[in-house]
Amino acid sequence: MTTINRQATPQYPQYSKDPQGLHEDLHEIWGNPRGLKAFTIVNHSTLGLRFMVTGMVFFLVGGLLAMLVRTQLAFPDQDFMSPDIYNQVITMHGTVMMFLFAIPMLEGLAIYMIPKMIGARDLVCPRLTSLGYWCYLFGGIILSFSLILEMAPNSGWFMYTPLSSNEYSPGLGSDFWLLGITFVEISALSAGVELVVSILRTRTQGMALHKMPLFAWYILAMALMIVVGFPPLILGSVLLELERAVGMPFFEVAGGGDPILWQHLFWLFGHPEVYIIFLPAAGVVSTLIPVFAGRPIVGYGWVVAAIIITGFISFGLWVHHMFTVGIPQLAQAFFSAASMLVAVPTAIQVFVWLATLWLGKPKMKLPMLWIMGFLIIFVCGGLTGVMLALVPFNLQVHDTHFVVAHMHYVLVGGMFFPLIAGLYYWLPLFSGRMPSETLGKWGFWLTFLGFNGTFLIMHWTGLLGMPRRVYSYDSGMGWDIFNLLSSVSSFILSAGVAMVLLDIALHFRFGKPAKHNPWNADTLEWANRMPPSAYNFVSLPNVETRHPLWDNPDLPRAMAEGEHGLAVATHGRREMWGTDPLTGKVREIIHLPGNSWWPLFAAMALAVVCLSLLTRLYPLAGIAVIVAGLFLLRWSWENGAHPKAAPDAEVAPGDPPLHSRTMDGPGLWAMSITLLANGSFFLSYLFGWFYLWTMSPEWRMPETSQLSSVGLVVAGGALTAGAGILEKLVRGLRQRKDSGLAVGMYCISALGFVQVGMTLWVLLSAALAVTETSHDAIIMVGLAYALLHGSLGATLTLLQGLRVGYGYVGAHAPFEPAVVAQLWRYNLVTFWILVGALAVLPRVIGS
């Protein structure tokens, strides 16, 4: 083992003379601490496992709730649960399975696998992954605690208004849902941003976009869909919580609102979520089938095209869930056609999988058993999906058990079966041991038969007219025997799941040691040790093929002996390649932050915000928001040329520069993807404004705008001037000129605070009646949005001025002002759009 000198210039040998010493040096830099410091871990492998284990715990909770539901419905006229408790249980079952199990579980798998598959040592923003996990954990605990208090939401997992509004849900149940789910979605968005940037910018040298594993394509599409699809629900949750807590009538017809707006915002998220869940599972299928067929997948390009098309079409289907609310027939026809159209890219993938099996020599190992179960169940679910896309049929079975059965065939068949296949496939990588074929097969058949016994029969009860979400039914309706069979089958299904979980748990202790790459797979994750080290790879290879381990079976040995890139640890930095998003050519060396308390502290402060809002302790919530902001700013301080990041910019001869010494590091991409999510939120807000304006029967708009034109122009002028000066400074930094940088940053920050002050004055002087009309309430939300973003832009710019003074930013480290400039551009565009939509357009068009 060599002595690590964090100030030393790295020496870059062609390959390491002492592979074991290099392993030890890398472990000293990347290794995970123990004890209390384990809470500071930011390593993707550890955090991915935490996501998956936590998701599995919530899966057990959701499964227990499902068993309670089936026990209640096993016989007619049951009083096993009261109506209110039943509604709480069924609402929490859907909520837990959709928000606390399915998406976090798949994100955890992606967080664990993606760096290993693309030849990276970690994800590009490891502290963001840590923050996402803690937000997920705390949000899930807060939401689950409502069950213990018997105060759980009882309006259905989709929380339709007015059922979830104060009039019909006067307790804290809806608030638990709205605040807890919003907290959890911070986690989902952070993972989405992290995965997009990591896949685009940290693939190993030579791995062009058209050469990366199909699983990475699926995760890229999933992550982008999360970034675009989750903000509408976040907006809806914010608006509904404001209505419940303050009385702003966004969804009350008498105040100019419309309850249908909630359905639009929810399903703008909800239908893409189906494909957000399906795509990673399909990625598992596309990864496993070629391995067990012993040949490359047929039609790689067709699969990529199908992934992209599915992602786009999924955002045009949300009204598919709203055929019975009275939308125009033309809209029904459009969304019906779109709902059937999405079957085309799905069918392409199914035929590609079947063709690969047909042309290969399939080996029916345990993971393939689950893949075959998936193919059968998912195709059946897809066929019933096409049936539901037909408006006349949909009108007949809407809100019946037929829809419940269809949803479970698509989501359980389309997600759970591939997930278990993937877990069995990658278990040797996780643990270095093989699972039990006997227990695994028992688990599969019990699960497969129990699932079909439960939900295949449920199609029939739905066709017989049994509504969903009813806690009891009368004898003699013709549903008795079918409900009993479904309930018995559900316990068989539970036994199968228990068998699978027992097999996974026991294999860590009693499983046979696995040989290296036990399935003869083709992708880079199997070049790791089993289980993997904290840094994944000793050296990072040049990969120009889709099947690196098939084309070069000696690659794992060469990587482990340091014969490839970045086989150096004497500088003490956590390093990996930063590559071109299209070609995979190396651009820079990305240096990553180490373990940190700040993500945990920030998540704890946000949890206090959530609990304070839940208990209506608004002053405490305000204090907690400030504390969370301070933690996040302190976190951002340890970047770039900071002593804890990379004060020494020296690299080995011939290597590219560190990313913090360039103008195109991953932080720029992370800000871009974050602003994409922000833009989705903003567009959802504009959709709500124009929807209420044009559709609400009681919409009331004053003859003259309450907003001061002078105030808005002054605020916009300050924002425009600040953005212009910042652009000039960034252009200077690109030319390595930093004269007057600190003063410029302080001036820009001052202009930002002028914009904030004038916007606040416009808001306060408008005398908006926010509790009386949705018009005034939605204007208040828009101005609050501008205030929040203006304050953030001004604060971050002030921070940049301070960092220039400390020597962390300048011509030698020009990266960070370019990131802040992106936020200013976004603020500039959205502010003037707000002015046009809220102040100018009403004057031009009138009410």
Image (tube, grey):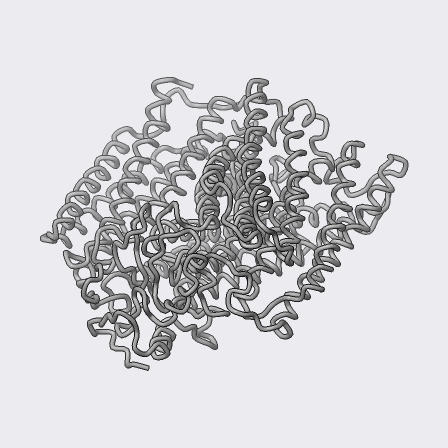
Identify which residue, 232 or 552, lies in the foreground: 552
Q: Residue at x 56, y 50 (%)?
A: 289
Identify which residue, 587 or 807, lies in the foreground: 587
> Can residue 235 be seen?
no
Residue 16: image location, x then y, percent: 30, 74
Above or below 602: residue 843: above
Query: Relative to 85, is 485 on the left or the right?
Result: right
Residue 196: image location, x then y, percent: 40, 49
Residue 776 image-quadrant placement:
top left
Q: Residue at x 29, y 35 (%)?
A: 829
Q: Residue at x 57, y 54 (%)?
A: 292
Q: Residue at x 59, y 51 (%)?
A: 361
Residue 224 image-quadrant placement:
top left
Query: Relative to 746, is 622 on the left or the right?
Result: right
Which quadrant of the figure contains the C terminus? Answer: top left
Identify which residue, 327 or 709, lies in the foreground: 327
> Can residue 778 be seen?
yes
Which quadrant of the figure contains the N terminus? Answer: bottom left
**Residue furthest right in the image:** 476
Residue 2: image location, x then y, percent: 29, 81
Query: Relative to 383, is 12 on the left or the right?
Result: left
